[in-house]
């Protein structure tokens, strides 16, 4: 039997604990985003910004270019809003993608260290099938979207389009990048503290329960 039921079920507890820590990470990043948004004087909810996203991507996924429908779209942060990428909800880092790309990009976003590029979104768009192991899931994903002879060019075009869009919001992107290392340190701390608190607090509650 290759499926290990016990191991699978045990994972659920661990997952609940990292879910709560990741929620705190996201809340912290949203608060920092508010500060930066105020500093640059433009929010991502501003009609001017919404219009800019619309005119740049025209209702298409910012990565694969497929047309978006409301049930297949996701708010996308090229620099992922997690403890590894420390991206913020600020102009230049909020676009729209299809759910599939949003989901597939997570593999790169969850890496402690990126090897294909310096940012998560560029890394995601660098899986052209020439740099990874034969079993790379992201390379396989891009192969399922485009034929081999178009893949490299299309990935490059998507990278350029996003780069060009982000260049229009240099001020906020630079603030995010400058804060990257200190944000990562703070986020690691928040993540650890939250897990520790959850473990201890639940232990106390469980002891009182029985
Ligand atoms: Zn897509
Ligand atoms: Zn790959």
Image (cartoon, grey):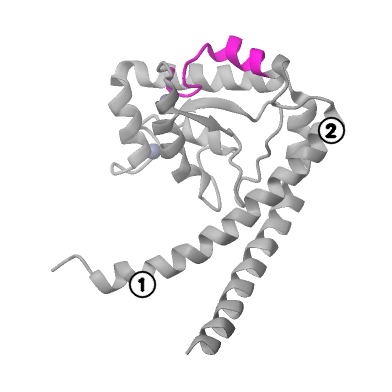
* Label 2 CA crowd tier, 10 Å (few <14, some 14–19, many 20+): few
- Which residue does the numbered mark 2 point to in the structure image? 38
The image shows residue 170, relative to residue 103, as above or below, that is: above
Q: Residue furthest front?
A: 209
Asked which secondary structure carries label 1, the reply is helix
* Residue under the image location 47 percent in, 21 percent down: 61
* Residue under the image location 47 percent in, 35 percent down: 124
Magenta region, residue range:
50-65
Question: How many angstroms separate mark 1 from mark 2 (CA)?
Answer: 44 Å
Q: Nearer the viewer, residue 184 or 128?
A: 184
Say which mark, if any, is on residue 92. Answer: none
Earlier residue among tags 1 and 2:
1
* Residue under the image location 79 percent in, 24 percent down: 42
Q: Nearer the viewer, residue 161 or 68?
A: 68
The image quadrant of residue 172 is top right
- Image location (x, y in percent) of residue 119: 59, 37
- Image location (x, y in percent) of residue 90: 71, 32
Q: Nearer the viewer, residue 42 or 201?
A: 201
* Residue under the image location 38 percent in, 67 percent down: 11
Q: Is residue 11 left or right of residue 161?
A: left
The image quadrant of residue 200 is bottom right
* Label 1 CA crowd tier, 10 Å (few <14, some 14–19, many 20+): few
The image quadrant of residue 14 is bottom left
- Which residue does the numbered mark 1 point to in the structure image? 10
């Amino acid at each position: 039997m290759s499926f290990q039921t016990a191991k699978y079920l045990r994972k659920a507890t661990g997952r609940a604990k990292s879910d709560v820590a990741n929620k705190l990470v996201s809340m912290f990043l949203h608060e920092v985003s508010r500060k930066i948004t105020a500093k640059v004087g433009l929010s991502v909810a501003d009609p001017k910004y919404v219009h800019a996203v619309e005119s740049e991507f025209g209702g298409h996924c910012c990565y694969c270019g497929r047309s978006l429908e409301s049930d297949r779209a996701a708010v996308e942060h090229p620099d992922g809003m997690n403890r590894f990428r420390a991206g913020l909800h600020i102009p230049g880092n909020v676009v729209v993608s299809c759910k599939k790309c949003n989901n597939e990009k997570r593999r790169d976003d969850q890496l402690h260290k990126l090897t294909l590029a310096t940012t998560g979104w560029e890394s995601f768009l660098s899986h052209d099938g020439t740099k990874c192991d034969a079993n790379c899931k992201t390379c396989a994903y891009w192969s399922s979207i485009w034929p081999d002879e178009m893949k490299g060019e299309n990935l490059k075009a998507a990278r350029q389009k996003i780069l060009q869009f982000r260049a229009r919001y240099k001020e906020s992107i630079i603030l995010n990048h400058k804060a990257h290392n200190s944000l990562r340190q703070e986020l690691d701390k928040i993540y650890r503290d939250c897990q520790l608190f959850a473990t201890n607090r639940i232990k106390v509650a469980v002891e009182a329960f029985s």
